[in-house]
Amino acid sequence: MAETGINFVMETLDALKSSGNYLSIEDEVKDLIATLYDKLGLLRTFFKEQEEGFYQNEKVKSLEIRIREVENVVKKRIAPCISARSREGESTMTYNGVIAADEVVSKLKELPLNLDLLKQEIEAIETELKNYDKIIHDLGAIQIENVCNRDSLRVNASALPEEIVVGFKDEEMTIREKLTRGPKELQVILIHGMAGQGKTTLAKKVYNDPLVVYHFSLRAWINVSQEYQKRDLLLGLLSCVSDHANEINQMSEEKLGDELRKRLKQRKYFIVMDDAWDGRVWVDLKQCLPNDRNESRILFTSRHEAVACAQPVSFSLTLPFLTDDESWELFQLKVFQSGTCPFELMEIGMQIAKKCGGLPLAIIMVAGILANEEKRKDRWEEVEKIMKQWMGGNLELCTKIFTLSYNHLPRHLKPCFLYFGAFPEDSQIPVRKLIWLWIAEGFIQKTREKKLEDVAEEYLMNLIYRSLIMVSKRGYEGRTKTCSIHGLLRGFCLEKAKEENFLRQISGVPEGSSSSSCPRRLCIDSLKLQTDRLPSVLDPHSFLCIGCGYAAGLPPLAFLFQRLKLLRVLDVSSIQLDSYPKEIEQLGFLRYLALSLLTASLPASICNLCNLETLIIFGTWTSLTLPIEKMEKLRHVLLDGQVIDQGVETLQEGTVKTPLRKFPESSLPLMDSLQTLLWVNPDHCLSILNRAPNLRKLGIQGKIVTADSLTFPRLTFLQHLQKLKLFNTSKVGKSVYLRGYNLPRNLKRLSLHGTNLVWDEISRFGKLLPKLEVLKLLAGACSGLFWVTGEVEFPKLKFLKFESLDIECWKGCSSQFPRLTRVVLVRCASLRQIPSDIGYITTLQLIEIRYCNHSVADSAREIQEDQESMGNSSLKITLEPPIFKQNEFSE
């Protein structure tokens, strides 16, 4: 893509100007660099303003090839001369390793010739573009498959439609009966049908059915996929039935199997194994699934009926295609929010729905196109005319529809969509990670009034609204937390990405590669990574290891940093490194870095990565030094994993101690790009916080209470802070002297763990934090058995969670929580009931109860019944797993 190549050349010239070596360049050359930069800026603006049809012309495609050649010239001749950072008294690190300063100067003396060559190439491109009016005229009438909307659709994140299910009513009833009735022996049920037919949708519906939820003690869901690791399946199942995630991650495969069997023993369980390709999964797991004759059930979904041959299937259901009426109903619901098609579009709409062959995925995809088109008959007739030309089976039909959907995407959304091919099959993709990657890749267009992260979220919502991406998990306010892509669409992404040299996966022996065809992004399964099987020529912008499990014991990765000289994105977090590889500092363009370290030691020289925007480190540490004082471009810092703090129990979330070198405050740059800082130690984070005025998310973990002081520092100067997490690891008994007036009044989300606050202080948050929407009180957050809210009001609180608290009595009324939508209670064994008046909150939608006393469940049911008697059926109660008496779950 032309814009991508131009962006790279501009960034390289910009990096050259900011390099310490720039001082050695003659003034005449500096002027030439400035001229080239301005010319490239004009070219980039020109390409941004063109319609999609402009890029389909062969003449324009030849221009894109010439721009790629310019990019290659820059890669070979200029980029190697740029130091990652050059400071007085420090070594000069280049992409070729550490070289002497006089060698750098000698290389830079050749720059005029290199830049003259660039100038000639850029001016040739400008000459060709002078005739662009004729190029556009030659395009003629643009066919629908080459048209895209000029403007991206703006979608409110909380207004996205919920998943729609049409048809399969008889099948749903049959599966539900097979799950909740019948013999006591362990039963295996199979739903099979072709890809895109709705197997997973039907399985999700019965999995979440209230009768099914109530019937089983434990439920678990895992995605199997074509290539799976037994360890990953065991971890996935255990994460559904165990709260001790960090402990199970350290177990061997054999111990994981024993632990799963132990957890399921004597429990009535229901397990869904989605998208199984053959019977191997049953062979691998059957020893871990006890048959205690207590009506436990296992449900497989598969594209292949032959899966039934490898396991004792008790019932097999072949999923039917949708009828014409069902197809039309689903089509209307996806295209029109009201679910009703205007009369003038009805006939043509029915024809389009019928041509989808009863395949739900095909219907949803076509509907996603038309939902974003003008509701005009001639536009719909063009789509119907294209579909009429398609022949062949359903899989071929899907491919044609995917191509049509892709061609209808606005140009700026296409790379965002293709990027989903980089993630493993059936993976649940965290939106936070996806957005950070998009920004590092340069996909997100800057706007004056919005942050890049907010624009990126809009892009994602567009893809979801167009039915290209699925929502996997939503937050309390309806925002997407994790997303996924259908397996068929992922395959299309990989093929299209390979065709456009956008992205390529390597597993095993790669195809031959040349400098002209090397993809911009490489995705390699870390479990199959072999250094001698990588392409001989590498110059990608991104290197992603996509293994689901940790690949330990691999040789050092220095070879990567010597060969991948122009990386912007490096994610090797699925490979456990013994120590920080200092060779990374040769990657001066690096924007995104994700590592997994066995030993927590980061040298001060990490600051050489002066362009780094996102830093993610996983590991198990007692402490971690994080010398980021001079990394002024950092936007997000996330330190995640298991942390062992001496004298304290093993913690469930990551933290770091961040002792900083002692710099004079005036010598440190302003870190005004920093938005996320998770997790840091309270003793050493103030130096960073004082220079991060735009911080939005902050997680502090460690000994917040010390022998010297019981006062938590004032954070009122962080006016943009919206999310704060505090995890105190001091010994039980000490309280954090935290006062609401020490926190920013704009705070929207607050999570407390181990702070040991009195309940009166929690009540004061209602007055001192008027914008608070989420309040999570986790283990040890509060001391005291009673919370009487009194006259305090939480005016905007929407989400309230208690977890592992000792509270016995909670008294409150509806007027104190006027906007509450969701209440979550987890492992509050001593709590006797929920305040009955909570039911009169008109906005309340859901009460979730897990592992609490029977009386809590009874009070929730009474609230629900009381509301139903008054005509309010919108309040839902979930008890998952079903409530046990205290002596049944206190293990």
Image (spheres, rainbow, N blue to C red):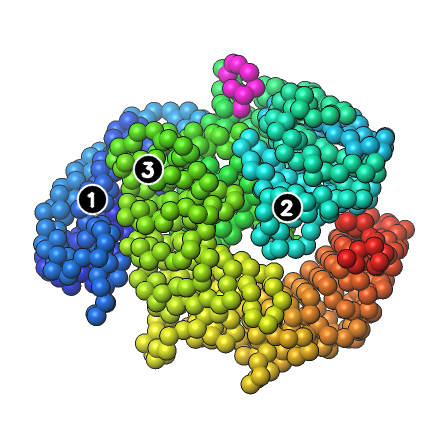
SS at mark 1? Answer: helix
Instruction: Determine contact: label 3, label 2, CB under 8 Å.
Output: no
Give the image location of residue 678, x and y in percent: 51, 63
Q: Which amino acid does label 3 sit on?
A: Asp
Residue tagged by mark 1? 76
Q: Residue at x 46, y 66 (%)?
A: 624
Which of 639 and 229 lies nearest the eye of the viewer?
A: 229
Neighbor class of circle 1 (other Cα within 10 Å; few <14, some 14-19, many 20+) is few
The mark closer to the camera, 3 or 1, is: 3
Q: Earlier in the sequence, mark 2 or mark 1?
A: 1
Drawn side of residue 205 relative to residue 564, left or right: right
> Mark 2 belongs to which amino acid?
Leu
Q: Height in image: 788 above or below 356?
A: below
Upstream in sequence: badge 3 or badge 1: 1
In magenta segment, residue 62 = no
Residue 279 is labelled as none
Q: How many marks?
A: 3
Tell me, yes or no, whether the highlighted magenta stretch contains residue 391.
Answer: yes
The residue lying at 39 percent from left, 49 percent from top is 570
Badge 1 amino acid: Lys
Question: From mark 3 to mark 2, how far is it between C-alphas?
Answer: 33 Å
Cα separation, mark 2 vs mark 1, equals 50 Å
Q: Name the residue under label 3.
A: 532
Magenta residues, start to end: 390-398
Mark pair 3, 1: CA separation: 23 Å
| Residue assigned mark 2 | 256
Q: Is residue 228 left or right of residue 296?
A: left
Looking at the image, is mark 3 or mark 2 earlier in the sequence?
2
Q: Which of 420 and 387 is in front in this view?
A: 420
Helix, strand or loop status at disc 2: helix
Q: Height in image: 620 above or below 342?
A: below
